Image (tube, helix red, strand yellow):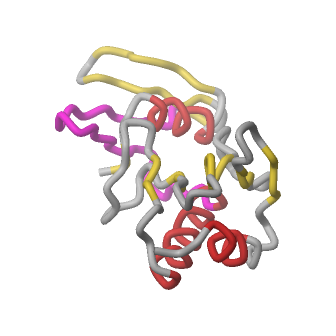
Amino acid sequence: MLTFEEKLTIIETFPQLVRKEVSLNRVNFHFPESQFEKKIVVYHLHPNGNGFVYAAGLPGYEKDRKGFVNIREFSEPALILLLQDAIKALETVETVETLEETWINDNQFELTLLNEDLDTWLVYAGDLLDGAFNSYKEAANYLEEEGFRRK
């Protein structure tokens, strides 16, 4: 297990992350350039070595219901890879070549994200309209907050 100081050293090698001190000597790291409303990449890194990295939508990681991975037992290479993946996911809004995407949650429930025109994105549950948004980013944020990921 890496110490708090070792984790800090690794995280601080990512210049795009901004350190924010929080209560109980914990530290958060924000990614101000995120293309989503979610800005926190590292959450509540504690001097005891516990902490979390936001990884909603990233396959291969055990996440809590909010999309965070506990990094307490992570090795240096594993932490670096997770941070790289997490930052990439927050900085990239994939270009939507087709005007329709299917999103799925842990219960295998599917929603469809459809581009109505240049500035209207609609979310459908089957034939029922679930929501309308002014941008892809706004619609994707909504779906992620509701526990969905691209299929």
Towards the viewer: 138 or 30? 30
Queried whether the magenta region covers residue 102, the answer comes back as: yes
Residue 61 quadrant: bottom left
Image spot of residue 102 (x, y percent): 32, 43
In this view, 127 is above or below 151: above
| Most distant residue in the left direction | 108
Give the magenta range.
92-116
* In this rendering, position of residue 85 left or right of residue 44: left
Towards the viewer: 23 or 89? 23
* In this rendering, position of residue 93 left or right of residue 32: left
* In this rendering, position of residue 119 left or right of residue 132: right
Q: How many marks?
A: 0
At x 70%, y 69%, the residue is 8
Queried whether the magenta region covers residue 110, the answer comes back as: yes
At x 47%, y 27%, the residue is 122
At x 62%, y 52%, the residue is 46
